[in-house]
């Protein structure tokens, strides 16, 4: 479907459900990074952001930045709205325990 959106002149994709079946953000960037600004996808709010092990949050964010930021065209933000069961400390987590 994304090639059809390119043909229609769409130039930004938001949101990006990084936990969707078959989603590979590195491949998405490789294939469509020149066609779209990728907005979102920085952290999975349904699964990862609610983790009790904050290293998993750090690792997810680092992986998404590595996958999506090279060459520009990536606006870092969460996948969707932050879920009600996410601890506020996880939202504010800055990579330090």
Image (tube, helix red, strand yellow):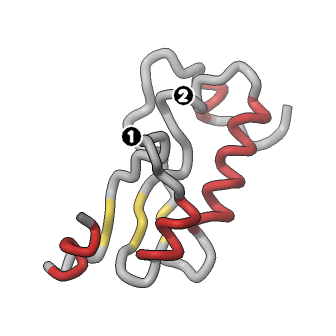
The x and y percentages for residue 1 are 23, 64
Residue 39 location, quadrant: bottom left
Of the pair 82 and 37, the residue shown nearer to us = 37
Q: Residue furthest top?
A: 85
Task: Determine whether the residue tagged by mark 2 lies in a helix, strand or loop.
Answer: loop
The answer to which quarter of the image holds residue 80 is top left
Q: Residue at x 43, y 24 (%)?
A: 83
- Foreground residue, 89 or 51? 51
The image shows residue 82, relative to residue 86, as above or below, that is: below
Residue 5, percent from left and from top: 20, 72
Q: Which mark is residue 80?
A: 1
Q: Residue at image x 36%, y 75%?
A: 36
User: Which residue matches tag 2?
Assistant: 47
Distance between the alpha carbons at the discs numbered 1 and 2: 11 Å
Instruction: Say whether residue 82 is left or right of residue 12.
Output: right
**Label 1 secondary element:** loop
Which residue is at 42% across, 42% downward? 20
Image height of 79 relative to 2, above or below: above
Q: Is residue 78 left or right of residue 81?
A: right
């Amino acid at each position: 479907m994304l090639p059809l959106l390119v043909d229609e002149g769409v130039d930004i994709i938001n949101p990006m459900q990084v936990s969707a079946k078959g989603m590979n953000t590195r491949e998405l960037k490789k294939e469509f990074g020149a066609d779209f600004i990728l907005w979102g996808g920085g952290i999975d709010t349904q699964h990862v952001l609610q983790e009790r092990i904050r290293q998993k949050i750090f690792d997810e964010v680092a992986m998404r930045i590595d996958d999506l930021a090279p060459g520009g065209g990536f606006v870092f933000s969460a996948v969707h709205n932050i879920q009600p069961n996410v601890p506020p400390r996880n939202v504010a987590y800055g990579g330090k325990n």
